[in-house]
Image: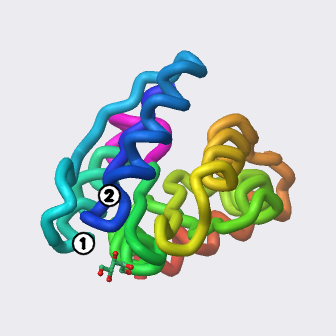
Amino acid sequence: MKIAIGCDHAGVRMKETIKDFLTKLGHTVEDFGTYTEQSCDYPDIALEVSTRVANNEFEKGILICGTGIGMCIAANKVKGIRAALCHDTFSAKATREHNNANILTMGARVIGEGLALDIVKLFVETEFSNEVRHQNRVNKISTIENQ
Ligand code: RB5
């Protein structure tokens, strides 16, 4: 799978760990920065990754900041993005099955790397359920987006 990844200064180390992990699993990961721990603005990175996912250049995106919250808010402003903040494995699986989320956000100051990798694996490997009720709800989100 082609995956776009990005972070702000708070998520640089976690991003590197996730890149290694996904690459070893056979995925193609493109890194949209930031690359150092020098302070930067998370919306800039969220826009880079989200635009590419929305344009179908990448199947999924992963965004990391201190809390995961700013990245999630910013990513969800891009049309076509369903970004989910997940700090537990149940949510990671459920947001793929129910919401067809296409971007995962996490907070590097909130969870450790071991849990983050479990979350990433579930997010990447879980398919959307395709159940009509879930598809209808996702369609309603698109309707709101188009208003
Ligand atoms: C940066 O200090 C911090 O605000 C950012 O990483 C993130 O947590 C924002 O939501």
Above-or-below relation of 25 to 105: above
Residue 2 in view in this figure = yes
Instruction: Report how far apart the C-alphas of labels 2 and 1 lie in the structure.
Output: 10 Å
**In the figure, 92 relative to 77: above or below?**
above
Q: Residues within 10 Å of mark 1 (few under 14, many from 20)?
A: some
Q: Give the range drawn in magenta.
A: 54-61
Residue 65 vs 118, above or below: the answer is below
Q: Does the residue labelled 1 lie within 8 Å of ligand 1?
A: no
Ligand 1: image quarter: bottom left
Q: Is residue 145 visible?
A: no
Q: Which amino acid does label 1 sit on?
A: Pro
Tell me what residue is drawn at x 21 percent, y 60 percent.
37
Identified at 38% across, 41% down, the residue is 16
- In the image, what residue type sits under mark 2? Cys
Residue 7 disc label: 2
Q: Residue 17 carries which label?
A: none
* Quadrant that contains the C terminus: bottom left
**Residue 94's x, y, as percent?**
79, 59
Q: Give above or below for 84 relative to 103.
A: below
Compared across the picture, whether 24 is left or right of 140 comes to left
Q: Where is residue 103 in the image (x, y as percent from the top left)?
A: 50, 55
Instruction: Give the image quarter of residue 124.
Output: top right
The local secondary structure at tag 2 comes to strand
Q: Name the residue under label 1.
A: 43
Cβ atoms at labels 2 and 1 below 8 Å apart: no
- Mark 2 is surrounded, within 10 Å at the Cα level, by few (under 14), some (14 to 19) or many (20 or more) other residues, namely many
- 115 part of magenta stretch: no
